[in-house]
Image (cartoon, helix red, strand yellow):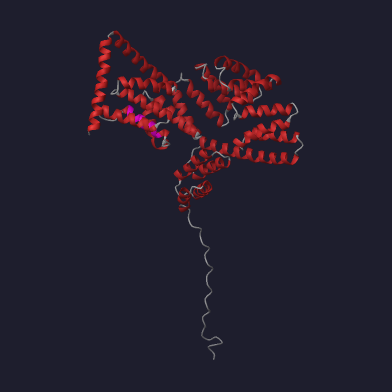
């Protein structure tokens, strides 16, 4: 008790000191107030733009001056939530409740958005979508959070629906067009995706990821003339970003300029050692110039990180053939066929879920199992748990999860899923033959 009172006295003394300084400073105090208001408005802009570290620093200044302003705590909660710091976000929201005497609408919405980010999107999405349909001013923020959650778990159908709503609510915002392009790519509608990226750039010419992705798509189509203007723009806009000279190196390779391509790509691989496109391009350059043995380490590096990278596997086939290693090339070709078929099936199932969403646990299980086989554990686990949400007793899912956790040495989770497996049915024993009853009048009865 004495410690808490002492702390209260110290805080009050500190507050009194600040007030005394401001009062005696006169014009300096007024200038400080202007400075804090500028920090507040800048923090609002930073949160909207995703500059969360800058926002956090500015909000720290605001909270020192306005510690009992619920609006500041609400924005601080939003910044913390967007950073994934849910403990801090919840503390600020609880402070809002204490200051306001109840959980206001804005505070309730933030709590719901935090639940979305924590993985409870299906539980709270209906409530949030009702708020959107009622024309709430925070509709774009709600739809952004829902879209991000659906995209994170490759739920393309719900993601498209929320992105379409976001575009309806904010037709002049570039980000929903950029994100919708990302989703459209993954359901094999690349033409519409490119249109969305172009629309995003009309609205925000400096939207780096949209322009970079558009350039990459032109490079993937072996069309350097279309990619080059975007890469030149990016070189002027963000020359310090290593992805830009990396993609320019790929472009020079396609243009038939191997010397410039090598210079750019070798510099890029130092800055981006795990960039698959850079290493595959360097490998192709080495093969073209008759050095397949130098190409192989680049391809092995990519495949170690992602064993299902079909571009790397296909290039490895050519690399091994050029070295006369025919049996290894044949094995790589067989693996390439398997990986291609597996990824094609995964994309088909995901597209079916987008086009015709169901509550079928088998569909979610198959997607999850395919992701596990591809080494994508996070997505595999997500879709397997989706299967269990649809059917808590789904036997193939429990069996797969039990085996996965056993391999990882997680006995507790493995045992939990083993307990959910129904015991194997015993084969019914054949009916036992009964002794024949003696009939009167038979041979024995004659005696």
Q: For the point 60% across and 37% down, which residue is it?
A: 343
Residue 407 is left or right of residue 21, and the answer is right
Foreground residue, 282 or 440?
A: 282
Foreground residue, 191 or 346?
A: 346
Residue 408, given in percent of the width and then of the height, sits at: 52, 46
As drawn, the residue found furthest toward the right would be 324
Foreground residue, 25 or 376?
A: 25
Task: Look at the picture and state if 128 lies above or below 433.
Answer: above
Q: Quadrant of residue 215?
A: top right
Task: Look at the picture and state if 87 lies above or below 13.
Answer: below
Residue 365, given in percent of the width and then of the height, sits at: 52, 44
Q: For the point 29% across and 23% down, which residue is it?
A: 67
| Residue 114 among those drawn in magenta | yes
Residue 135 visible? The answer is no
Principal secondary structure, stretch drawn in magenta: helix
Residue 354, given in percent of the width and then of the height, sits at: 51, 35
Image quadrant holding the C terminus, namely bottom right
As drawn, the residue found furthest toward the top would be 27
Residue 115 is left or right of residue 212, and the answer is left
| Residue 318 among those drawn in magenta | no
What stretch of residues is rendered in magenta?
106-115
Foreground residue, 137 or 330?
A: 330
Q: For the point 48% across and 31% down, which residue is it?
A: 159
Q: Quadrant of residue 7?
A: top left
Residue 143, given in percent of the width and then of the height, sits at: 42, 28
Q: Quadrant of residue 37?
A: top left
């Amino acid at each position: 008790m004495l410690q808490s009172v002492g702390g209260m006295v110290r805080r009050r003394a500190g507050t009194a000191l600040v007030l005394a300084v401001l009062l005696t400073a006169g014009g300096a105090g007024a200038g400080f107030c202007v400075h804090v208001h500028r920090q507040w408005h800048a923090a609002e802009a930073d949160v909207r733009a995703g500059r969360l570290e800058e926002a956090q620093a500015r909000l720290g200044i605001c909270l020192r001056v306005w510690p009992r302003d619920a609006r500041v705590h609400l924005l601080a909660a939003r910044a913390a939530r967007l950073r994934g710091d849910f403990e801090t976000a919840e503390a600020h929201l609880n402070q809002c409740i204490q200051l306001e005497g109840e959980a206001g609408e804005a505070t309730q919405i933030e709590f719901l958005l935090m639940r979305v980010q924590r993985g409870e999107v299906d539980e709270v999405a209906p409530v949030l979508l009702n708020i959107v349909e009622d024309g709430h001013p925070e509709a774009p923020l709600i739809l952004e959070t829902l879209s991000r959650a659906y995209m994170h778990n490759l739920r393309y159908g719900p993601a498209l629906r929320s992105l379409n709503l976001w575009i309806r609510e904010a037709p002049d915002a570039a980000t929903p067009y950029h994100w919708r392009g990302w989703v459209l790519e993954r359901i094999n509608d690349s033409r519409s995706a490119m249109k969305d990226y172009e629309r995003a750039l009309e609205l925000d010419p400096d939207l780096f990821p949209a322009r970079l992705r558009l350039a990459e798509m032109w490079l993937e189509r072996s069309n350097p003339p279309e990619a080059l203007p975007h890469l030149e723009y990016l070189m002027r806009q963000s020359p310090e970003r290593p992805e830009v000279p990396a993609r320019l190196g790929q472009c020079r390779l396609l243009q038939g300029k191997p010397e410039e391509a090598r210079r750019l790509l070798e510099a890029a691989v130092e800055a981006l050692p795990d960039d698959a496109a850079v290493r595959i391009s360097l490998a192709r350059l080495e093969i073209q110039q008759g050095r397949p043995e130098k190409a192989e380490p680049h391809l092995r590096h990519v495949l170690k990180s992602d064993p299902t990278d079909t571009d790397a596997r296909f290039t490895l086939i050519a690399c091994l053939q050029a070295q006369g290693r025919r049996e290894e090339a044949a094995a790589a070709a067989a693996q390439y066929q398997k990986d291609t078929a597996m990824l094609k099936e995964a994309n088909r199932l995901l597209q079916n879920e987008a086009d015709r969403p169901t509550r079928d646990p088998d569909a979610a299980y198959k997607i999850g199992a395919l992701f596990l086989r591809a080494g994508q554990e996070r997505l595999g686990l997500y879709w397997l748990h989706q299967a269990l949400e649809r059917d808590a007793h789904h036997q193939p899912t429990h069996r797969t999860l039990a085996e996965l956790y056993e391999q990882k040495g997680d006995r507790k989770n493995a045992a939990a899923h083993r307990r959910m497996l129904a015991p194997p049915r015993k084969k019914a024993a054949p009916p036992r033959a009964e002794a024949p009853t003696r009939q009167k009048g038979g041979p024995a009865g004659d005696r």
